[in-house]
């Protein structure tokens, strides 16, 4: 880990008129990140009101423990502890982690993987808190209740309607669900019960078959018939159109198949991850700085939004820093498995360098609480457009951590 702090003390250039390095150009990234988290902890001490973003006036916006993002702030604090080894961050990480205790018994949707693995999982990994093991196993048991043997998938949401107000989704599965498989794989290791691993593998294989197109882009939502297991609908909920490539969804899928290979060593998952990566990295609409548009196909000819969209509302198409951070974290891990190591390292490094530049860091303005600006929650819902988001920060920290481990040749 000797390279870790070196990664965090980066050079950021605030002037375009010079390429020379001098003392005023040096930017203390770890100090900057610590300052953001200290501001957040001062503004919100109640660990059941969890930071997610800010409002238009820069005020902190929080969510309750049952929100899908509830585990990320605790995860950020665990990364701060790992980065600094300062016990004050461990104390706070434990507090914000254990506020989520009751989630282990909840099976209201698939997001318990995000909620509990980013918090309790990192507490076990970085804090050495072995008492978290049974919590993770119980959470996996709760998540497994959403698995259906006929669909061979884990149900993401309960019943809801699509954008047209007519199409009914009785058993919707979203690509985001691939991220929750890590909890299941880990729980199998911790418990010795292969049930959780078997569910994870089956879900991943079914998603390969039904979510992905020939070019390795993916649908956001696939709805299933629970009697026959047949696919009833393929659509979007947060992307530009049903047939487009919503950027964060592509990132979730890439990350998910990389972790599937980590746990199974099955080459089909590695090959699949590499094909997804190729789609993203070679896309004609990927900007030069590697921070994707919120949807790879937004405004492209032939892609028609399923919702009320007015392109004039967005003279500049919003980027999604969160999608870039997730992608970078996945690419760093993928580089450790692939013969294309340097391709993935170069891409991940460019993404992280862009995110750690003044274009995306919240150095000025009203964002006092989060590391990054310029993420997108859901444009179709008119929610969290071009704002900081707690999970963008989480995956940036994870990407930086993974980069440092690779440079230290410690593995991931």
Image (cartoon, rainbow, N blue to C red):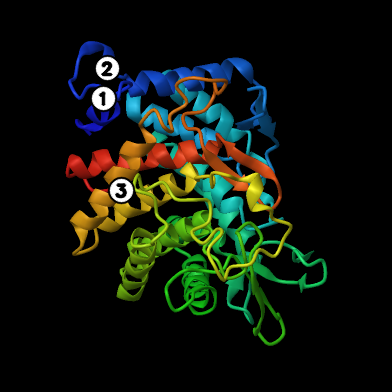
The disc label shown at residue 27, or none: none
Mark 2, secondary structure of its residue: helix
Which residue is at a point 60% across and 59% down the rendered structure image?
239
Mark 3, secondary structure of its residue: helix
Task: Residue lying at the far top in this picture: please name it.
Answer: 24
Pick the quarter of the image with the N terminus: top left
Residue that badge 3 annotates = 348
Question: Dots 1 and 2: beta carbons under 8 Å?
Answer: yes
As rendered, which of 99 and 59 lies closer to the eye?
A: 59
Residue that badge 1 annotates = 11
- Quadrant housing residue 302: bottom right
Task: Residue lying at the far bottom in this picture: please name it.
Answer: 228
Few, some or many residues within 10 Å of mark 3 (<14, 14–19, 20+): many
Residue 161 falls left or right of residue 185: right
Q: Position of residue 301 (x, y in %)?
A: 54, 67
Few, some or many residues within 10 Å of mark 2 (<14, 14–19, 20+): some
Whether residue 228 can be seen here: yes
As rendered, which of 221 and 382 lies closer to the eye?
A: 382
Few, some or many residues within 10 Å of mark 1 (<14, 14–19, 20+): some
Real-space Cα separation, disc 1 to disc 2, in angstroms = 7 Å
* Location of residue 71 with respect to 260 vertically, above or below: above
Nearer-N-terminus badge (1/3): 1
Residue 24 falls left or right of residue 127: left
Q: Position of residue 368 (x, y in %)?
A: 54, 20
Residue that badge 2 annotates = 25
Residue 6 falls left or right of residue 36: left
């Amino acid at each position: 880990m000797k390279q870790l702090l070196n990664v965090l003390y980066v050079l950021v250039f605030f002037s375009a008129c010079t390429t020379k390095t001098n003392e005023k150009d040096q930017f203390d990234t770890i100090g900057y990140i610590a300052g953001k988290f200290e501001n957040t902890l001062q503004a919100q001490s109640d660990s059941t009101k969890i930071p997610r973003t800010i409002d238009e006036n820069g005020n902190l916006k929080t969510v309750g423990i049952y929100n899908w993002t509830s585990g990320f702030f605790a995860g950020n604090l665990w990364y701060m502890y790992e980065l600094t080894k300062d016990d004050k961050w461990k104390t706070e990480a434990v507090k914000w982690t254990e506020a989520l205790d009751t989630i282990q018994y909840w099976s209201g949707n698939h997001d318990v993987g995000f909620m509990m693995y980013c918090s309790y999982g990192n507490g076990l990994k970085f804090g050495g808190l072995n008492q978290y093991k049974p919590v993770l196993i119980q959470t996996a048991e709760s998540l497994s209740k959403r698995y259906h043997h006929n669909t061979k998938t884990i149900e993401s949401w309960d019943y809801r309607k699509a954008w047209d107000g007519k199409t009914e989704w009785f058993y919707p599965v979203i690509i985001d669900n691939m991220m929750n498989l890590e909890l299941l794989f880990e729980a199998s290791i911790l418990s010795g019960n292969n049930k959780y691993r078997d569910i994870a593998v089956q879900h991943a294989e079914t998603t390969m078959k039904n979510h992905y197109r020939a070019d390795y882009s993916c649908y956001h939502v696939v709805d299933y018939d629970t009697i026959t297991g047949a696919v009833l609908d393929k659509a979007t909920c947060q992307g530009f159109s049903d047939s487009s490539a919503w950027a964060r969804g592509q990132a979730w899928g890439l990350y998910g198949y990389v972790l599937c290979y980590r746990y199974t060593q099955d080459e089909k998952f590695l090959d699949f991850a590499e094909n997804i990566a190729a789609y993203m990295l070679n896309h004609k609409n990927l900007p030069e700085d590697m921070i994707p548009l919120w949807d790879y196909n937004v405004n492209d000819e032939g892609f028609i939004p399923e919702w009320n969209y007015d392109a004039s509302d967005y003279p500049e198409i919003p980027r999604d820093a969160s999608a870039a951070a997730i992608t970078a974290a996945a690419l760093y891990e993928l580089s450790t498995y692939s013969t294309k190591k340097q391709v993935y390292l170069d891409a991940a490094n460019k993404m992280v360098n862009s995110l750690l530049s003044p274009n995306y860091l919240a150095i000025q303005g009203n964002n006092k609480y989060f590391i990054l600006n310029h993420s997108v929650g859901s444009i179709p819902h008119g929610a969290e457009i071009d704002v900081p988001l707690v999970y963008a920060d989480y995956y940036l920290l994870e990407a930086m951590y993974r980069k440092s481990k690779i440079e230290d040749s410690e593995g991931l």
